[in-house]
Amino acid sequence: MGVPTIGCSCKVCTSTDARDRRTRPSIMLEYGGHVVLIDSTPDFREQALREKITRVDAVLYTHAHADHILGLDDLRPLTFKREQKLPLYADDNTAKIIERMFAYVFDPESTYSTRPQVTLHRLNGALELFGAEFQPLRVLHGHSEITAYRFGTAAYLTDFSSIPNSTMEALHGLDLLFLDALRRRPHPTHSSLDESLRVVEKLAPRRAFFVHMSHDLGHEETNASLPAHIRLAHDGLKLEFEI
């Protein structure tokens, strides 16, 4: 729901620490003159203006929940500048929901002249984009299978409650791991702080950043309780790694 959460006056929602202001989770990868997004959130417009994003070359989707896809329409002004349609990638179930929710974009009979100029591709194994390989990996978000991604020495796992053994095996040897850590208390569809700490311990990445935190976790207070190589991510965080 984002932090501050609408209607809430808790300590985190009223915090003056800018790192406690959290738009919905997404990351931008910039390499070789290209820009790849993972998810386009309802806050994409705000994020793009803040980070001065002037181009996007591809978008990968993790799943079709509202907080991960509703910014698709805000890709419009970036697609108008392109010679070819902007490629989007998602698993079949996610793609079907996106096509239904954004029928005016994908319906071949649509006459909406300023719709986003995009084309939606089904993921079918590892994907090469601009010289980098993106490996889709399955994680469980409650009872739903969704897509995590490994790219080079980094991996991005949002919205998971458990990780299959086959995916765990594909996540060793990481420099950088992003993973869900919603709150301290257990949740039926998200990893808790302690559960994510155990995942980091098993995988032993050099650095780990928690994402998708609710207003139960304050930035400074939570970071003070974590090992030095594990931190909460924050809006505008910039990191370097080998892709």
Image (cartoon, rainbow, N blue to C red):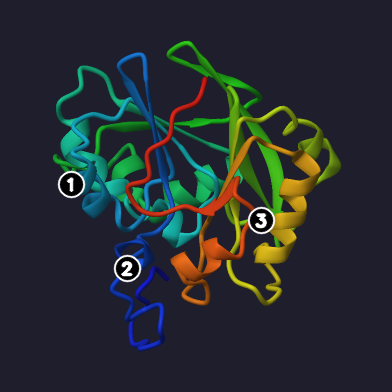
Image vertical order of residue 73 relative to residue 218, above or below = above
Where 17 falls versus 172 (above or below)? below
**Label 1 Cα neighbours within 10 Å, binned few <14 / some 14-19 / many ≥20:** few
Asked if marks 1 and 3 touch (Cβ < 8 Å), the reply is no
Q: Position of residue 154 (x, y in %)?
A: 58, 31
Q: Which residue is mark 1?
A: 49
**How far apart are the alpha carbons under marks 2 and 3?**
27 Å
Give the residue at the far right of this rendering: 165
Observer able to see residue 171? yes
User: How far is disc 1 from disc 2 in space, using C-alphas?
Assistant: 21 Å
At label 2, counting other C-alpha atoms closer than 10 Å, the crowd grade (few under 14, some 14-19, many 20 or more) is few
Locate residue 124 relative to residue 96 in the image: left or right: right
- Residue 160 is labelled as 3
Q: Secondary structure at mark 3?
A: loop
Q: Which mark is residue 17?
A: 2
Nearer-the-camera pick, 195 or 105: 195
Q: Give the amino acid at mark 1.
A: Leu
Find residue 208 and report its image quarter: top right
Residue 139, how many percent across, how many down?
71, 47
**Closer to the N terminus: mark 1 or mark 2?**
2
Element at badge 1?
Answer: helix
User: Image quadrant for the N terminus?
Assistant: bottom left
Front position among marks 2 and 3:
2
Res. 163 in view: no
Give the camera-side residue of 17 and 115: 17
Nearer to us in this view, 92 or 125:
125
Question: Which numbered disc, 1 or 3, marks the residue that appears first in the sequence?
Answer: 1
